[in-house]
């Protein structure tokens, strides 16, 4: 029996898509000594995580892991200058990460304060439980 070439390409493409998706980093558990905080939110709440930051140093915050399963969704991320030092050159501020719950469950977030060359300055781990 001969299988049409198009069908082979479809199955091969689906296999590649699935295998790429399974390579995403997902944090399933964090030791309590590394956990910075635990948040419990309801389905009608939003969660804002604030991290002290100063992008003029070359370091920026990013989320290292993919949020999976889709318990929460990132709504936005913004840098906000510190109100007390807005007129100072090179002054820092805060990165605000805002999340929206999608379904009940829990997820771990891993934030890294890193330079473009890969040098890591800080790491933060948070557990988020949605009820």
Image (cartoon, helix red, strand yellow):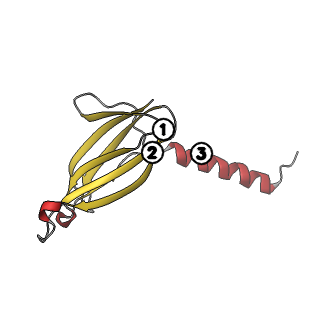
* Residues at marks 3 and 1, CA–CA distance in whole angstroms: 20 Å
Relative horizontal placement of residue 108, taking residue 89 as reference (left or right): right
Count of marks placed on residues: 3
Residue at 47% over, 39% down: 44
Q: Position of residue 33 (x, y in %)?
A: 22, 29
Label 1 neighbour load within 10 Å: few <14, some 14-19, many 20+:
some
Label 3 neighbour load within 10 Å: few <14, some 14-19, many 20+:
few
Specify the label residue 100 is tagged with: 2
Q: Position of residue 77 (x, y in %)?
A: 36, 56
Q: Which of the pair 51/62 is nearer the observer?
A: 51
Specify the label residue 71 is tagged with: 1
Observer-side mark, 2 or 1, equals 2
| Residue for badge 3 | 18
Give the mark, 2 or 3, whose residue is nearer the N terminus. 3
Residue extending farthest to the right is 1
Residue at 12% over, 72% down: 89
Q: Position of residue 82 (x, y in %)?
A: 18, 60
Relative horizontal placement of residue 63, taking residue 120 as reference (left or right): right
* Residues at marks 2 and 1, CA–CA distance in whole angstroms: 9 Å
Give the mark, 3 or 1, whose residue is nearer the N terminus. 3
Q: Secondary structure at mark 2?
A: strand
Residue at 66% over, 53% down: 13
Q: Is residue 54 above or below residue 18?
A: below
Q: Which of the pair 34/86 is nearer the observer?
A: 86
Q: Position of residue 4 (x, y in %)?
A: 83, 53
Give the mark, 2 or 1, whose residue is nearer the N terminus. 1
Q: Is residue 67 above or below residue 90?
A: above
Observer-side mark, 3 or 1, equals 1
């Amino acid at each position: 029996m001969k299988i049409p070439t198009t069908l082979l390409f479809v199955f091969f493409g689906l296999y590649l898509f699935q295998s790429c998706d399974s390579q995403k980093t997902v944090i399933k558990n964090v030791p309590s000594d590394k956990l910075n905080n635990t948040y419990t939110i309801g389905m009608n709440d939003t969660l804002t995580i604030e991290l002290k930051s100063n992008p003029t140093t070359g370091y920026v915050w990013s989320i290292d892991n993919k949020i999976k399963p889709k318990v929460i969704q990132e709504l936005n991320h913004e840098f906000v200058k510190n109100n007390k030092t807005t007129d100072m050159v090179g002054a820092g501020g805060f990165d605000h990460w805002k999340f929206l719950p999608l379904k009940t469950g829990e997820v771990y977030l891993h934030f890294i304060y890193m330079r473009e060359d890969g040098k890591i300055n800080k790491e933060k781990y948070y557990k988020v439980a949605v009820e």
